Image (cartoon, rainbow, N blue to C red):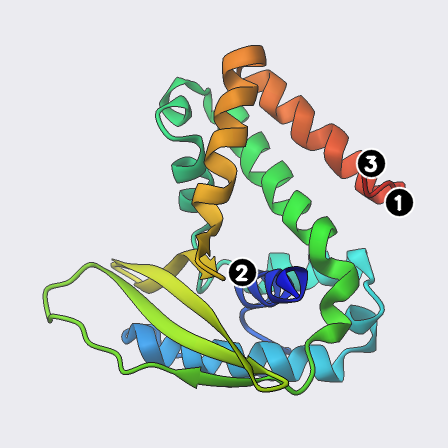
Amino acid sequence: MKKFFLISVFAAFFSFGGTAFAQAVDSSAPDALIKTVTQQVVDAVRNDKSIQQGDISHITQLVNEKILPYTDFRRTTQLAMGRNWRAATPDQQNAVVEQFKMLLIRTYSGALAQVKDQQIQYKPFRMNPDDTDTVVRSVVMNNGSPVELDYRLYKTAQGWRVYDINVLGAWLIQAYQQQFNEQIQQHGVDGLIQFLTQRNQQLAAGKQS
């Protein structure tokens, strides 16, 4: 059950934007942004057989084309690395961002077909006019079982951007902070890059362990 809703995290976080004909998204209001892009995600998965079949190249293309307008995965990676981010060179930072993104893509892409008829209920949204960081809270109903799914966003000059997601009480950034820190402490930033790269190679070869 937990893995299913991690799939929802992947779908929401990496497939924002939906199909090429998706409606324009107003990113000036965080709750409206989440509601619109989430619906587009569900529609895209339902209508794209390649995604349903776990086609990595197709999913990666969708991610690369649609992620940038509504998310800040670089910020996600920076927060997951903590103080180690500042010690990394720009090339190392870029490498971690790309490998981390690909890790999440490869980990959950094969199960995207399970995103079908789940109902999403949004909790009342409240935010002060001067807030620059906020959380949009929702509940996913799967066969009558409610599961928490929340989105953390921050305000930029271009609008609101998603940078973290909470599923079943676990925030994505927190889930990786300890692992990243351990790898860097033991092997440095290059060791983290190597770890992520090797893991992606294992997943590409079909090794799930």
Q: Position of residue 95 (x, y in %)?
A: 59, 31
Quadrant assignment for the N terminus: bottom right
Residues at discs 2 and 1 in contact (Cβ within 8 Å): no
Mark sitting earlier along the chain (2/1): 2
Mark count: 3
Q: Which of label 2 and label 1 is nearer to you?
A: 1
Give the distance between the C-alpha atoms of the residues marked 2 and 1, in whole angstroms: 25 Å
Q: Nearer the viewer, residue 126 or 209?
A: 209
Task: Look at label 1 and name its amino acid.
Answer: Gly
Tell me which residue sits at (49%, 61%) in the image. Answer: 167
| Mark 1 crowd level (few <14, some 14–19, many ≥20, 10 Å Cα) | few
Residue found farthest to the front: 145
Question: Which residue is at 60% across, 60% downward?
Answer: 6
Give me the C-alpha separation between circle 3 and circle 1. 6 Å
Q: Amino acid at mark 3?
A: Gln
Residue 193 located left or right of residue 52: left
Q: Is residue 192 left or right of residue 32?
A: right
Q: Which of the 4 image quarters holds residue 144?
A: bottom right
Q: Looking at the picture, how far across and down is residue 29, in whole percent?
A: 28, 76
Depth check, mark 3 against mark 2: the one in front is 3
The circle drawn on residue 67 is: 2
Vertical side of 44 occupied by 109: above or below: above
Determine which residue is flagged by label 3. Answer: 202
Q: Secondary structure at mark 3?
A: helix
Instruction: Give the residue type that dot 2 points to.
Output: Ile
> Relative to 134, does residue 106 appear above or below in the rendering?
above
Q: Which residue occupies 35% across, 60% down?
A: 152
Q: Earlier in the sequence, mark 3 or mark 2?
A: 2
Residue hosting label 1: 206
Q: Secondary structure beneath disc 1?
A: loop
